[in-house]
Image (tube, helix red, strand yellow):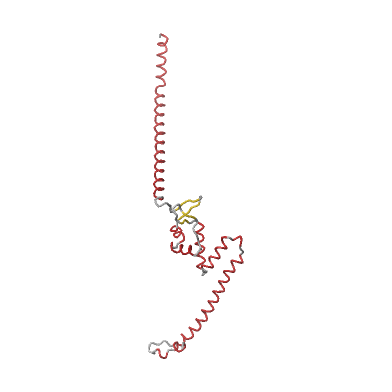
Amino acid sequence: MPKMNLFLPLGVKILASFGKDLCEAFSCLENSLHYLMARILTNLLQKSSRNRLASQNNCKNSIFGFKSNEIVNKEVMFQIGELAKRCGVTADTLRFYEKNALIKPAGRSDSGYRLYNEENQKQVRFILKAKELGLSLDEIKELLGIKLEATEHSCAEVKAITSAKLTLIDEKIAELTKIRTALKKINDACCGHNNDDASHCSILAALE
């Protein structure tokens, strides 16, 4: 017991000499723990919020058993309305193309709704560009068939379709030119006066 009393003053002196530094160290440690706990709590709240939002979206999208954009076999799929919006046409136009076997759905949702993919989008754009060139649905269908199996066909087959269309257009132009010439002839022969009655009209006479 006397020996402990001998070391007690020494211990008091040591604590007195380091007391200030220890207090600062404990204070710094306490602040660090508070910051760490705040960060952990913030991360947990953010994660919980994201999970809740994702759950709400999934619930909303699955009310009717399908989503506007679904991923099937790692491929983005969308409904006919989205395809129509992307291509700048109406849903009825797409249904018409589908009815005529120009396009077909890439798949169906769990509820049976038709789903389309980016390849369908490319096909619709192909159809629209071909229509601008005056190609018929049958001609477009033939070109699409060749495109789907391009390695099995030649450029000559493709050119044969467009060449035939050019021939048809040239024939129509020639026919329209002939019609225009004849129509212009009788049109120029008519005086077109307001004070002359039609009984003397050269156009009516030419048509007799």
Q: Which residue is more in the foreground, 160 or 95? A: 95
Q: Is residue 143 left or right of residue 65?
A: right
Residue 58 lies left or right of residue 147; in this view the side is left
Residue at the limit of the structure toward the top, as seen here: 2
State the quadrant of the N terminus. Answer: top left
Task: Give whichever of 60, 108 is nearer the camera.
Answer: 108
Task: Name which residue lies at 49% across and 51% down.
Answer: 72
Q: Position of residue 176 (x, y in %)?
A: 51, 79
Find residue 70 and report its horizontal and vertical position in percent. 46, 52
Q: Is residue 174 above or below residue 145?
A: below
Residue 5, by quadrant, is top left
Q: Is residue 205 above or below residue 139?
A: below
Residue found at the far bottom of this picture: 200
Please give the name of the residue rendered at 41% of the width and 24% of the height, measured from the top-left corner: 22
Closest to the observer, 154 or 29: 154
The extreme left residue here reads: 195
Left or right of residue 196: residue 170: right
Looking at the rendered structure, the number of numbered marks drawn on it comes to 0
- Where in the figure is residue 19, as x and y percent of width and height? 40, 22
Position of residue 29 relative to residue 141, above or below, is above
Q: Nearer the viewer, residue 59 or 27?
A: 59
Could you tell me residue 152's position as x and y percent?
61, 61
